Image (spheres, rainbow, N blue to C red):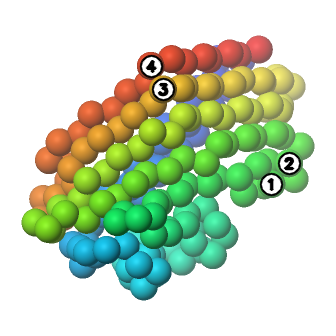
């Protein structure tokens, strides 16, 4: 069972790293200042496709839509659920959304108030696993500076959480 937990932990780390890289790569171009438009969302999508693959958008893992004066980047990993079901496992991920607001100085305000929730159930070898992570009251707030290719400020946390493993 310990070996399974390590494998699951490594997969979770890769998933977390991938989501972080998506957020960073998404904000690496200052070309989107001004009001959010469908054209700007498409331009942002094209920019992100350089860091990732066009399949991230074609498969629906990522979508970018104008939302007022900002862009909503939605990470939806439900296709992992479909791939897992084909193997007899079950995975569930709730979509996670970042709100990216271009600033006049070429930086971006990045915020999120999305809860994080996922669950997994299946077998690895003869060992069954079943776990759930539910984090609520989650907030992220920062300023991404494309010139630095990094966040100049960032705070993130969750007020409540639940982790269950059987």
Please report the residue visible at 83 percent of the width from the left and 24 percent of the height from the top. Answer: 128
Of helix, strand and loop, which one carries label 3?
A: strand
Q: Secondary structure at mark 4?
A: strand
Marking on residue 85? 2
Question: Which residue is labeled 4 in the image?
Answer: 159
Left or right placement of residue 72 versus residue 63 in this view: left
Of the numbered discs 1 and 3, the one sitting upstream in the chain is 1
1 to the left or right of 87: left
Q: Position of residue 60 (x, y in %)?
A: 64, 66
- Circle 1 sits in a helix, a strand or a loop, which is it? helix
Is residue 20 found left or right of 78 in the rendered image?
left
Residue to which mark 3 is pinned? 137
Distance between the Cα atoms at labels 2 and 1?
A: 5 Å
Q: Quadrant of residue 158?
A: top left
Whether residue 30 is visible to the viewer of this picture, yes or no, is: yes
Q: Nearer the viewer, residue 136 or 80?
A: 136
């Amino acid at each position: 069972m310990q070996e399974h937990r390590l494998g699951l932990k490594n997969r979770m780390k890769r998933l977390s790293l991938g989501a972080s890289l998506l957020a960073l790569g998404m904000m690496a171009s200052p070309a989107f200042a001004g009001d959010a438009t469908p054209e700007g969302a498409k331009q942002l999508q094209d920019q992100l496709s350089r860091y990732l693959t066009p399949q991230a958008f074609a498969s629906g893992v990522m979508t970018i839509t104008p939302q007022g004066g900002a862009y909503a980047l939605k990470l939806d990993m439900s296709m992992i659920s479909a791939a897992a079901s084909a193997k007899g496992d079950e995975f569930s991920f709730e979509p996670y959304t970042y709100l990216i607001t271009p600033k006049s100085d070429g930086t971006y305000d990045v915020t999120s108030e999305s809860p994080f929730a996922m669950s997994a159930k299946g077998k690895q070898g003869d060992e069954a696993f079943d776990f759930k992570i539910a984090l609520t009251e989650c907030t992220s707030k920062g300023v991404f500076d494309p010139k630095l290719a990094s966040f100049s400020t960032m705070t993130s946390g969750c007020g409540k959480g639940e982790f269950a493993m059987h």
